[in-house]
Amino acid sequence: MNKPEPSCGPVLHGTLVAPCADVVAAAYTACFGFRVVADAAIDAAQAAAWGLPATEGLRMLTMSTASGAASWLRVIEVPDCATPEPLRRHGWIALEVNVRDVDSLAEVLRAPGSPFRIIGQPAFLEISDKIRAMQVVGPAGEVLYLTEVRAPVPPFELPLDPVDPVDRLFIPVLSAPRRTQAARVYEELAGRTALCVETRITVLNGAFGRPQDSRYPIAVLQLAGNALVEIDEVADAGPAVPNACGLPSGIAMVSLAVPPGTSPGLRRGDAGEWIELLPAQAG
């Protein structure tokens, strides 16, 4: 019997907190072809919906992919915020983005003066030779996993035909002290059980100075819309420190589509992460 469709997904937004939204926008425009589709102050209604009144009046910029098919990147400008040290905290640590040709993109990002720093060269994943990915750090201290999916990888449902060279956000990556506890909120939302495995994560080994063959317990949960959530159990990480607005710097929030009957709004996960739940028709 086929499994029922997940009741949560896809991933709608990844939201960064950065000292200068224009710097982030310039990087994503120059290297990925993204474009700004909204640029305005957060109003009182949005701040109230989040339960974060101190965000009112902050500038929030939204960017789409080159074609405009997906508008998933948001940047909240907090001028005095510090850029986080990549990967070394609990909460959202990476955004995995579907790309058409990771090796060609790597050539662009290796150019002198690139605003993205490569921390993992293109390579096939340990779990599948059908997935080739690289890892970079962006101007807000965010880590992006730039991933080319070349063929189906059962049991997962992954995006295979990106519209744009740098396309949708399809896997937010969470660092948590306990993967099974952190997974519960997403299992509840999706109506599915996470798959728990152990795998080598090279960029985490580099961030914490661990041997390159070190392995981590992870949980992976399928969402609707060819999206997933990945939860890495990282004992060495510390909590994310919030700014005065209530959100941490770097990757501050991930937005998921939820069906009717699920209360929208902002909630906290077990690792201290912010999860925005939005009606499924929102984009």
Image: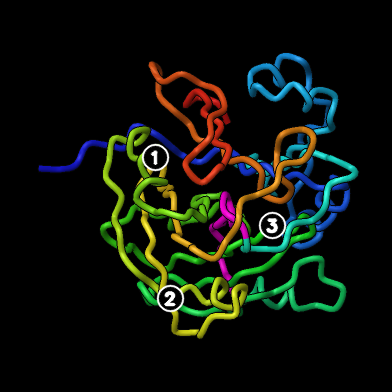
Left or right, 50 with reference to 220? right
Question: What amino acid type should be assigned to the residue bearing mark 2?
Answer: Arg
Q: Position of residue 97 (x, y in %)?
A: 56, 56
* Residue 116 picture location, percent across and down: 76, 67
Q: Secondary structure at mark 2?
A: strand
Q: Earlier in the sequence, mark 3 or mark 2?
A: 3
User: Which mark is on residue 142?
Assistant: 3
SS for callout 3: loop
Q: Is there CB contact under 8 Å for labels 1 and 3?
A: no
> Which residue is tagged 1?
186
Q: Which of the 4 image quadrants contains residue 70?
A: top right
Give the spatial CA distance, label 3 vs label 2: 21 Å
Residue at mark 1 to residue at mark 3: CA–CA distance: 22 Å
Instruction: Name the residue located 87 percent from the left edge and 53 percent from the top edge.
Output: 23
| Marks 2 & 1, CB-CB < 8 Å contact | no
Q: Quadrant of the C terminus?
A: top right
Please give the name of the residue rendered at 58% of the width and 37% of the height, measured from the top-left corner: 274
Dot 1 amino acid type: Tyr
Task: Give, as a single range, the part of the protein colored magenta.
Answer: 89-102
Q: Is residue 51 left or right of residue 190?
A: right
Q: Residue furthest left?
A: 1
